[in-house]
Amino acid sequence: MTSIDGILNINKPRGRTSFSIVSLVKRLSGIKRVGHAGTLDPAATGVLPVCLGQGSRVVPFLHDTAKVYKAQVELGVTTDSYDATGNITATGDPTGLSRQHLLSALDSFRGLIQQTPPMYSAVKHGGKPLYKLARAGIEVERKSRPVQIYRLELRRWQPPVATIEVECGKGTYIRSLAHDLGQLLGCGAHLKSLTRLRYGCFSLEDAVSLPQLEDGFHHGYWRRFIYPIDIVFQDWAAVVVDDAAEADIKNGRPVELPADDFQPGAGLLRVYNGDGLFLGLLEFNREKGRWRPGKVFSRA
C-alpha cells in the first residue's frame, strides 16, 4: 500500500494499554511503522498520539511539549503503585483536611520540583524496568529528578477525593504527584483516576474514539482522522524555498536564507517548497552562517 505519514489523535479508553492501541492501528492499517508518544497506564484515559510512517520521527519533539491532565486524588489511602491498581500499604485519616489545606499543599508542587519515579514505572534500573522489579517484590532506591509543573489547580474537593488539573513538562508522573501530596498532608494518597486532556497541540475534544476509528477503517474513511506531521511545529516560523534549495535540503546540504527575513536567533524553522509540501526542519549553523537540514521528511 502507499505509505502514509501522519499522526492520529486517539482517545485511549480505560483498560487498554498504549501498546495495544498501536497494535490495533498496525493491524487495521497495514502500516508497519507505527508508534505512540507518551505512554498512558492501562487505567488512564485520554489523548494518545499515534504516529504513522515518518510521523514516528516527530515523537522526540512531542515529548518536549506540555501535557495537561485531570486527576482524581483519593486521600487517606496509600498504595504501592501510587494508583488504584496497587495494593494498599497504609491508611490515614483525611477528615480534618479543608479546601484551604489542599490549596496550601498544592503550592509546594508548582514550578521546577524534584520528583521520584514510582517503582511501578518504565524507568530502568540496571537495565531492567522498575515495574518488573516491583512485580518480583524488589524495591530499589530511585533517584529524584527535576520536573516542571507549569500549572496546578484544584478543580473539585469532595472529601476524600480532590480533583486537580495539572499542566506539566516531560517526565512528570502524576501518580508520584498524588503520592507526594498525600505524604505532605500526612494522611497518604493515591491516584484514583487519570485523563490526559492535552498533549502538545492535540486535545481531548478533537480526539477520535476507538469505535469511531474502527468504523473508519471498516468503511474506508479512517484517513480523515490523520493529522499532517507539520502540525507538531505549527507555532514555529516557516519559510518557502525555491527548487534549487529544495534539492539541497533533500540531499542534506545547507542553504542560505535572506538575512532580512530570518536571523540566526530564529533557531529551528519549518521549510516548504513552492507547492506547500512540508520538507522538514532547518537549524542555523553559526560557524558557516547558513541553515542546514535538521530533519528531512519529504522523500526525494
Image: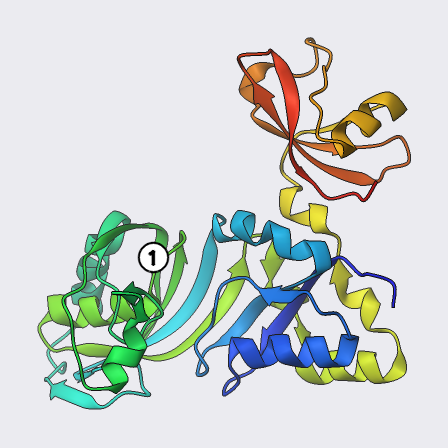
Q: Quadrant of residue 161?
A: bottom left
Q: Quadrant of the C terminus?
A: top right
- In the image, residue 256 sits, relative to residue 178, either above or below, namely above
Where's residue 152, x and y in %?
34, 57
Which residue ends up furthest to the bottom in the rendered image? Answer: 87
Where's residue 82, x and y in %?
26, 77
User: Quick check: 298 left or right of 163?
Assistant: right
Which residue ends up furthest to the top in the rendered image? Answer: 260
Q: Residue at x 63, y 34 (%)?
A: 236
Q: Residue at x 56, y 68 (%)?
A: 47
User: Quick check: 202 left or right of 145?
Assistant: right
Q: Quadrant of residue 96?
A: bottom left
Where's residue 246, x and y in %?
82, 28
Q: Quadrant of the N terminus?
A: bottom right
User: Quick check: 165 left or right of 294?
Assistant: left
User: Which one is in front, 219 or 235?
Assistant: 219
Judging by the rendered image, the residue that carries numbered circle 1 is: 152
Q: Residue at x 53, y 85 (%)?
A: 16
Rate crowding at label 1 as few (under 14), some (14 to 19) or many (20 or more) other CA atoms within 10 Å.
many
